Amino acid sequence: MNKRYQFLALIFAIIFTLLFLRLIHLQIVGKDKFSTLAIENAAKIVPERAPRGVIYDRYGKVIVENRPIFSVRVLPYVLSSQSQDERQRILSTLSGMLGERIDFKVSATEPIIVKDNIPLQTAIRIEERKRELEGVVVSSRPVRLYPYGDLAAHLLGHVGEIEADELQRLRREGYRLGDIIGKDGVEKIYDRQIRGCDGGKRIEVDVYGTPMRILESLDPVSGADMKLTIDLELQQIAEKALGKQEGAVVVMDVRSGEVLALASYPNFDPNIFTDPLENWKWKRLEQEKHPFMNRALAIYPPGSIYKVITLTAALEEGLAESDEIIDCRGSYKVYNDRIAKCWLEGGHGPITVREGLVWSCDVVFYELGKRVGPDLLAKYSNAYGLGRRTGIDLPQEKRGFIPTSKWKERNMKEPWYDGDSINYGIGQGWVQVTPLQMASVYASIGSGKIVKPYIVKEIRDRNGEVLYEGKPEVIGDVPLSPENLEIVRSALREVVLRGTGVATRFTGIPAAGKTGTAENPGEAHAWFICYAPYDDPEIVIGSFVAHGEHGDQVSAYVARDILKWYKINRVKREFPPDGPFSQYIVQRGKIRVPYRGKPRED
């Protein structure tokens, strides 16, 4: 029996020792932690959302701002203290003002949102009768407002409530459940700078949830303001010129890399993500053709606009001379049983390599592609910046793709054939580029330098301090000798003066560029890239219309409308006239009519 008593005593001693140690841990070691938890259990946080920074264009015009949304809430702990008749009177009055029935549950302790996004007039009427509506409060919160609707939607992006996967990734950076964050465009890329810092009140409550006193109050801090490189008026013109055609337009300063306009269609109205009443528009959008895809940063086959790279490689490697004559009879023999055709039925006849670019002769570039081969084409493509992202400060940008002989052997288990090279030479086959990349290529030809495109000019906080500043960044030199660069430039100028790009020619500003028609499943894609003024380039315009069939008849007109506006509204100097317009060219005694569209004399 004594041994049993001793064993029980030992067990009790151990239990009391553990309890004593636990008390020491709670009272001394964990004092700060558990004191904080106790305070938090006795307090409620009433958040106050900070407004996001305002977004301006390069001239200081507001593109994105904020607007208040008003909500009506009832405080259960106040209403429950009223008599039943008084409570019924308050709720009946409020129901009449809101136009809907309101039920009240006494068991609720948290403030209840009765109606969100009420009209300003209704909010004012409720505030005017505040004394009669005890326990009813009107609150407001800022939401994003895009005053121009769908203008520049892919560039600006939109905002929305943080999702589970985003919260898991961003929690360490201070993001919390219920935060509104940027989902696309510059709203997403620069979210940390422009989102602001939320404020709010920490209120002590009793066991029933009734507020006792304010423990802490913190005012929200507005986000930093952002100035873009975008020219708002030019953006409007670019989108108007593109119209309802599926495609994209890029307008960029060739000297600095500043993007002046970036349009993509189909597009969307970012306001539908901030207004619950616009949900029906969101459902309708889902049925359209990928409206959230930024086509300026998506990949497509380049077609004939790629021929400047083929010509670059041929000239630089000494595989062709600009005045070398190649006979185009409308087709090119690849193998004994395979014939590749030129776009001009009947052919261009004997034509120089330089004129081959002017008239976009496929036979000339079949031959050059075969001479140069895939690996040299890949070398010069990479030197121009193709096959990798430009680094623009926007999401969704694709790398594009530039094939090599090793890639084909590794992935397709086949050698590289001459037929692959002739397709490569005219920008077909496996080559994939983005409109932004090709605009950058032609900008580098115009300026002689490869520059990184960017969207954001600067970000400043409310005190005027610069938090971020976008600056021109030269990545490298154009991969052409001065002599060969002049050959390519002069040929591109002739494309507009008398070649396939005459639709872009008009008196006022001299331009140089190239048309492109890229074959793909379905109707061909239409391209036109140009820079202007020719003698001292300021801007490059990349125009792409999906399934537009002919660059000279579709995309060239888009670029032309933009050029005309730019000349009238942004260019300070005058240029001499180009001379009489001619749709025809006489070469070696033979009249050629390669232009398929109808030129517009205006």
Image (cartoon, grey):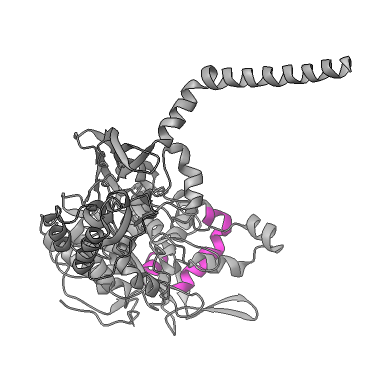
Residue under the point 25% across and 57% down: 72
x, y percentage for residue 523?
45, 80
- Is residue 358 located in the magenta-colored stretch of the structure? yes
Can you see residue 74? yes
Who is closer to the viewer here, 192 or 199?
199
- Is residue 136 located in the magenta-colored stretch of the structure? no
Note whether 232 is above or below 335 in the view shown.
above
Who is closer to the viewer here, 347 or 221?
221
x, y percentage for residue 302?
44, 66
Q: Main secondary structure of the magenta part?
A: helix
Name the image quarter holding residue 174.
Answer: top left
Q: Residue furthest bottom?
A: 346
Give the left or right position of residue 265, taking residue 86 as reference: right
Residue under the point 19% across and 33% down: 463
Who is closer to the viewer here, 575 or 38?
38
Q: Looking at the figure, which quarter contains the N terminus?
A: top right
Who is closer to the viewer here, 220 or 74?
74
Name the image quarter holding residue 297.
Answer: bottom left
Residue under the point 26% across and 83% down: 598
The total number of labels drawn is 0
Range covered by the magenta-colored residues: 353-378
Can you see residue 542? no
Give the left or right position of residue 354, taking residue 138 as reference: right
x, y percentage for residue 34?
49, 27
Residue under the point 48% across and 75% down: 519
Note whether 203 is above or below 246 in the view shown.
above
x, y percentage for residue 184?
38, 55
Q: Looking at the figure, which quarter contains the C terminus?
A: bottom left
Note whether 474 is above or below 234 in the view shown.
above
